[in-house]
Image (cartoon, helix red, strand yellow):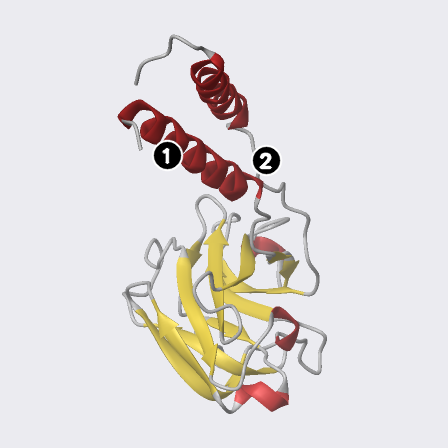
Amino acid sequence: MRLAQFFARSSLVACTSLLLVNFAAPASAITFDLNVISASNIGIGSQGLVTLTPNALDPTHKIDVVVSLSDGVLMVNSGGPHTPFVFNLASAVAAGSEVSLTSGNFIAVSGSQPATPYGDFTNGIAYNGQNGDGHGSPGPLEFVVFNASGITISDFVTNSGGYYFAADLYGTGGNAGSVAATSTVAVPAPVVGAGLPGLIAACGGLLALARRRRSSPTARY
């Protein structure tokens, strides 16, 4: 195959692949709001968000969890009976699930975890950093929940009190206490194909050049 023709066709293949990647739908994610507050001196309104996303490499068996705290909020050990961060899984997957942490100063704990006044949860994350005013972790807390038999976002369910998640936080009000999440919150989705105009123009130029080359009787490759 002539050299210029080869490069033209290779470039068109690359452009097509990039266009397909840009138009591909992003992984479906659900975000919960940590805005149920046990005492007003913790703060007012959202203290953080919990986002669940099917793992990009293994969406059937893994769910990625990211806990993003609001500015000035810290995750702490505020005293018992509390586990710093707790979540609740459906009974069918809770016993067989494993948690892998990607954040420092946190340890996964299993079995029934207390989070007064929100009740008990199936799983928790303990914080092993320094306690006291001004100490704690600003996050984000990131971990992966794995289940060999399969797991989906819908396996994250409410406990008997109607709460999906709870956390011990040093809140925006300047005091420590507990917060929880009972519902999802809308988060702006990324704009799919936002960088496409330039890519489409470049691919169109390559296509036009290839056509001119094929139709020109004097073209030399």
**What amino acid type is highlighted by mark number 2?**
Val
- Residue ID at (54%, 22%): 197
Figure check: 215 above or below 96: above
**Count of numbered circles in the view:** 2
Quadrant of residue 216 within the rendered picture: top left
Residue 123 x %, y %: 50, 81
Q: Amino acid at mark 1?
A: Ser
Q: How many residues crowd mark 2 within 10 Å: few (<14), some (14–19), many (20+)?
A: few
> Residue at 38% across / 30% down in the picture?
11
Image quadrant assignment for residue 209: top left
* Disc 1 secondary structure class: helix
Residue on which disc 1 sits = 10
**Mark identifier at residue 217:** none
In this rendered view, identify the residue nearer to me: 166 or 16: 16
Residue shown at 60% from the left, 50% from the top = 46
**Residue 78 makes an appearance in the image:** no
Q: Nearer the viewer, mark 2 or mark 1?
A: 1
> Which quadrant, please, contains the N terminus?
top left
Residue 3 appears in view: yes
Toward the viewer: 143 or 217?
217
Q: Nearer the viewer, residue 207 or 186?
A: 207
Q: CA distance from mark 2 to mark 1?
A: 28 Å
Q: Name the disc covering residue 191, or none.
A: 2
State which quarter of the image contains the C terminus: top left
- 221 versus 181 height, above or below: above
Question: In the image, 96: left or right of 134?
Answer: right
The single residue placed furthest to the front in the displayed view is 217
At which x and y percent is residue 60? 53, 73
Asked if 71 appears above or below 99 in the picture, the reply is above
Name, please, the residue furthest toward the top.
Answer: 218
Where does residue 94 sit, x and y in percent of width and height?
A: 54, 86
